[in-house]
Amino acid sequence: MDKKTIFKKEIWSAKALNTAPDSDNQIHGDEMAKEFGFKGGLVPGVTVSAYLLHPIIEKWGLDWLEKGWAKCKITSPLYDKEKFSVFFNEVSENKISSILRNSNQLVTANAEAALIENIQEIPKMRGDKIATGNFQGPKASRDVWMKLKKDGCMAFEYFWGGKNPLIYLRDQNNLPDLLNPSKKGFSNLSFLLGCSNWALASNAYMNPWIHLQTSSQNYQALPFNSSVISEIQVNDIFEKKGHEFVDVEVNLFKKEEKSCIMTINLLSIYKVRGSIN
């Protein structure tokens, strides 16, 4: 994102929701988060990403769900019940950039979004083995990620729908109609990007770990009560400033049709500096 971009107009504001306070990744819980110097449990990066794209989806609607691209980057923490505001800048007819400011007016995340016409290549399922319910991945380490890069990862199945679907606001009536489970009910970004998080964390156990950035491309909207298959591959593993990173690519498919919903490139810290886990 161009550092010279000026965001003057507040488009949307709300109170943050920690959608994963009881996650196996205890950075979302108050106790562990405070051990690492945070004020409390972190609102998941996938939820913050959904906030960044909320007004963009309101503007572009189904077009974004079917051909939208986004790059979302989390730079500082956002906490449960903290008020935030989203600002965006229309770069062109088919490109928008946005930022999220927390209650102290600090920019904690940013995004670029675009509508991509004439998508050339849509991923196809490789047919990776789908994990069973009792599958447990090994403890994450450089050697484990290198082995998964060489030998391949397990695929996982997820479900969008049911009585308590994952949404990023406390009141579903504050969601765009497209994403409201009681209306059109298409899947939201918190769930879709969440699938990449879950696939990563299920292939190798990490605690704590931090979601930093995604680049994603939509190919179709995911209707309510749909099963999803995630296939993941490891791209890179590296260390920087004491943190250890993993970069992966995740493709999400409709289970029955085997057609691709979204491609996600996910960058995460799998071992936080100072962590003994």
Image: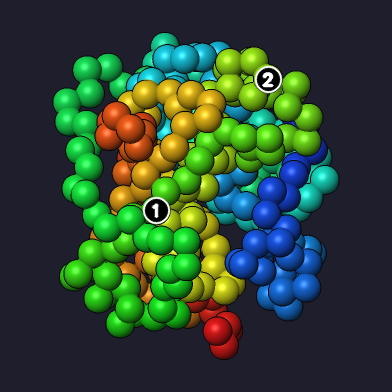
Q: Does 60 sit above or below residue 120?
A: above
Q: Residues within 10 Å of mark 2 (few under 14, many from 20)?
A: few
Residue in view at x 33 percent, y 26 percent: 219
According to the picture, the residue beneath numbered tag 2 turns out to be: 182
First along the sequence among labels 2 and 1 = 1
Q: Is residue 65 above or below residue 109?
A: above
Q: Residue placed at 24% from the left, 54% from the top? A: 128
The front one of 183 and 274 is 183
Q: Is residue 209 left or right of residue 135?
A: right
Residue 156's disc number: 1
Q: Position of residue 250 (x, y in %)?
A: 34, 49
Q: Quadrant of the N terminus?
A: top left
Depth check: 245 or 201 in front? Answer: 201
Can residue 112 be spotted in the picture? no
Above/below status of 39 relative to 116 = below
- Residue flagged by tag 1: what amino acid is it? Phe
